[in-house]
Amino acid sequence: MNKVYLRRKITPRVENGHPWIFSNEVEKIEGEVVGGEIAEVFSHDKKFIGKGYINPKSQILVRLLTRSKSEEINEAFFLTQLRKCYCRLVFGEADSLPQLIIDKFNDYFVIQTLALGIDVWKPAIVKAINEIFDPKGIYERNDVPVRELEGLPQQKGFLSAPFDTQIIINENGLKFYVDVENGQKTGYFLDQQDNRKAIQHIVKGADVLGAFTYTGTFEIHAAHYGAKSVLGLDISANAVAQANKNAELNEVHDRCKFEVANAFDVLKQWGKDGRQYDVVMLDPPAFTKSRETIQKAITGYKEINLRGMKLVKPGGFLVTSSCTNLVQPDLFLQIINMAAKDARRKIRQVVFQTQSSDHPIILGMENTHYLKFLIVQVQ
Ligand code: SAH
């Protein structure tokens, strides 16, 4: 087993719970490094810190799996770890299983193994799911570009007997189709579940516009909570088709419609046309994953929120999300404030929260606190 010794400056962060070790944070490594194997990590003064998987091809050399010297990383380890998780089912680093995502939709499981060292344990993970849950089906959604940074191919497919990949889930008393084969990510964004519920007090009798709607979840919640009219926009024709199906499934299609549109263009144009809504909701995809392009993300958020705000009637509400983990909550609030200044509108914060509670946050680990969900009243 490789022994990895940390630089003195790095030791406290990792000792205090952070599971990542970058290649430039290492003082020395004993033994020949083989990607995907388990390595032991020590402090600069040779105290044992933990064990994790190693990959010399990745910028993140080691990701820790355990802090116990006696705990073996084997099939049984994954069974024990999966038993400790709950709900979603696994949220990577926050569940001490770095780069593993498991979403549970009824009795179906969708998994992503986004690093080499966790990918080698895929059979053990599947075995553990089978043992704990007696699932109806398991699907792999590893068609994610980030895998290439780890030297892994992009792939997707069944890890169980084939099943109908259009699943209907229940959320907050509503029904939604989840396409686990062709949907985005694992098919559905479970992390916004509590936030979708948070709009119920502001949409009664309202004319609502939602952009970046995906399969229409926020918009269908709005219609269900009493909105007068709802229009949802997405650039993906597939997403819009699925959203319209979801509206029918929940019998709100008379007042809840979806259209294909580029939100950046359309919101700008409608602002010029003087269109007004009681509530405008925005949930764009992550604008950057790297620090180098953070400025681009800030500009993007400011722009789209400025355009959204201009469409809100005085006294109405802007509902806005950001899932870019590099834009931390304080920065996001600053951006929204800048947008309000530029739009010459006064805002007051009504709700400010994060992802659903089954995606826990590890203090000191910024990327586990990635979702910002804000409702402001716009004067
Ligand atoms: N609100 C959704 C998740 C949105 S994900 C939910 O709760 O499930 C972001 C969505 O933005 C994706 O569906 C993507 O297709 C869409 N999108 C990306 N760029 C866009 C653009 N310029 N205009 C409109 N939609 C866009």
Image (cartoon, rainbow, N blue to C red):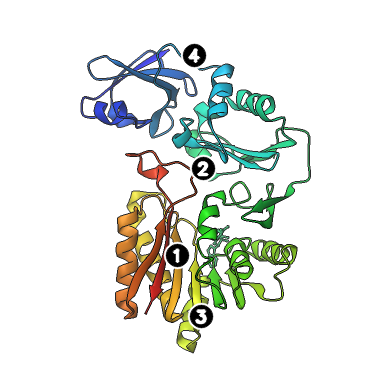
Residue 33 showing in the rendered view: no
**Mark 3 C-beta closer than 8 Å to ligand 1:** no
Which disc, if any, is residue 358?
A: 2
Q: Are marks 2 and 4 in contact (CB under 8 Å)?
A: no
Judged from the image, the secondary structure of the residue bearing numbered disc 2 is: loop
Q: Earlier in the sequence, mark 4 or mark 3?
A: 4
Of the numbered discs 1 and 2, the one sitting upstream in the chain is 1
Q: Which residue is mark 3?
A: 277
- Which kind of residue does numbered mark 3 sit on? Tyr
Towards the viewer: 362 or 28: 362
Crowd tier of the residue under label 2, counting other residues whose Cα lies within 10 Å: few below 14, some 14–19, many 20 or above: some
First of labels 2, 3 by sequence position:
3
Give the CA distance from mark 2 to mark 4: 27 Å
**Residue at which label 1 appears:** 320
Expressed as whole percent of the image width and height from the top left, the position of residue 362 reads 38, 38
Q: Is residue 151 left or right of residue 129?
A: left
Residue 250 in the image: above or below residue 257: above
Circle 1/circle 2 CB separation < 8 Å? no
Question: What distance separates the C-alpha of mark 2 from that of mark 3?
Answer: 33 Å
Task: List x then y, in percent, for residue 189.
Answer: 57, 52
Q: Which residue is located at x 35 percent, y 44 percent?
A: 366
Task: Please name the amino acid that badge 1 sits on.
Answer: Thr
Q: Nearer the viewer, mark 2 or mark 4?
A: 2
Quarter of the picture for ligand 1? bottom right
Placement of 250 over or under 206, stated as above or below: above
Taking depth in this image into account, of 332 and 159 the one nearest to the observer is 332
Disc 4 marks which residue? 72
